[in-house]
Image: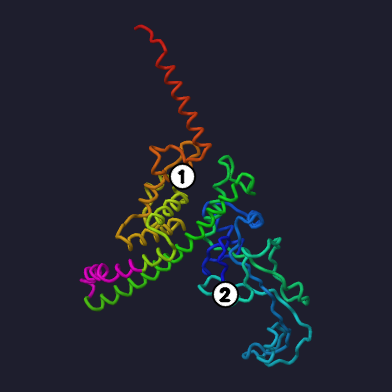
Amino acid sequence: MDIPTLKTQPAFQERNLIPKEDFCKFCEENGVTVTEKDLESLHREGLLYPAVKLELGYSEFRKIYAVFDEQTKQKEWRFVHHGHEDRFPTEKVEDTPYYSTGSLSYGSNEWLKWYERSVSFPSVLPFFQWKKREHAWMVKSKKKADGMYELMYDKYQFLAVRLIRDSLTHESDLFPVPLKKIRKDRMLERLYELYAFLRFYFDTRDMHVRWIEKGYEMYASIKKTVGEKNVKEEWDVEFLKVHLPAMKKEAVAILKAHKMGKADVMRWIHFLARQSLLSRHKQGKPYLAKVVEKTLTGTELTNTMIHVLNDFLFALDKYRQTVKAVLEQSVRHCVICSRAYTPKSNVKNPLTCGKSDCVDEQKKMQKKLKRSQKITDMAPVEDA
């Protein structure tokens, strides 16, 4: 299956793909509300494409009268796939063909290979009006059963939805998107950058999972040789001598393949830190102070991503940091809109997120404060 290489094609992994209605629920769980109607609007405008379109097709059945239970020997009418009639001790076959809309089974690493002839990519197709997916069950009309399709999104596309959402005004974050308020060209560039990062991240995540599995295998092997008492000490030596150098070699190769550097990885870690529910608004700060690392890593997808990238950086140069430290150190909150932002290194003591509305409002507040201080300084003091 050839996946389009256009910038507009969202990055995806097969195991991450979910139907559009499930994608809306996943976005909701991760702090951003979007409906199927909103997604269709974004598709129409060429801002956000479904990762995959899957034609469901149809299956043909026949109704047969046969024995299906060898113990009871009782005969009954049932539907079977056309061509499978002779698999049962059939007494009667109804000539009328019946049809059912094709089913959908997804979630494994290579599930798309079973549907390869039915897969297309909306990113390279002209826009088409969405139609509601319906399932026809044992109808006599082939036309009624056929023609259904499912639009699939990668779970990680919720970050793209959030990028678009955050480009709206601070007064409202409700869809449908007021597209006139979005610089479409800049928005598209940011989305293309996100897709490129996700392709990089998918490689780092695969590396992360694979090396954890190898680590457990190595630990078990050492334990058999030296026993429970000495396994930790031997494992630490083996890790530094064999495991870590091999990880570094693979990490360097991944950076090179994606034309990225450590500074780029840190930039994306800062981006992900701003997406965490505990860091997006300053009201979450007291909760962040109490929560433990394991909880942080396991409850939000963006935090899991930070954890994986932290391990990737450790493989490169033994630079160790925690998710909690990243969230605490790399995020500040705008004094005007309260949204999370990463301070720019060239700005001294930044107080706002940098958006023009917030900068202007903060300047007005500063001028107002100075005027009030000047008036206070000039006010006469009554004699005691």
**Image point 41% across, 46% down: which residue?**
331
Q: Is residue 259 left or right of residue 143?
A: left
As shown in the figure, which amino acid type bears the numbered disc 2? Met
Residue 341 at x, y = what percent? 45, 45
User: Of the numbered discs in the image, which one, if any, rests on residue 306?
Assistant: none
Q: Which mark is residue 1?
A: 2
Left or right: 49 in relation to 194: right
Quarter in which the C terminus is drawn:
top left
The quadrant the N terminus occupies is bottom right
Which residue does the image show at 54% across and 63% down from the upper left?
154
Q: Nearer the viewer, residue 65 or 317?
A: 317
Provide the secondary structure element on which disc 2 rests.
Answer: loop
At x 51% / y 60%, what residue is drawn?
Answer: 195
Residue 137, relative to residue 283: is it above or below?
A: below
Residue 361 rendering spot, x and y as whole percentages: 51, 32
Mark 1 vs mark 2: which is more N-terminal? 2
Q: Mark 1 against mark 2, which lies toward the viewer?
A: 2
Q: Which residue is mark 1?
A: 340
Q: Give x and y (percent) for residue 374.
A: 42, 18
Identify the colour scheme used: rainbow
Residue range corresponding to the magenta coloring = 227-249
| Residue 230 sits inside the magenta stretch | yes
Q: Give yes or no for contact between labels 1 and 2 (Cβ–Cβ under 8 Å).
A: no
Under circle 1, the secondary element is: strand
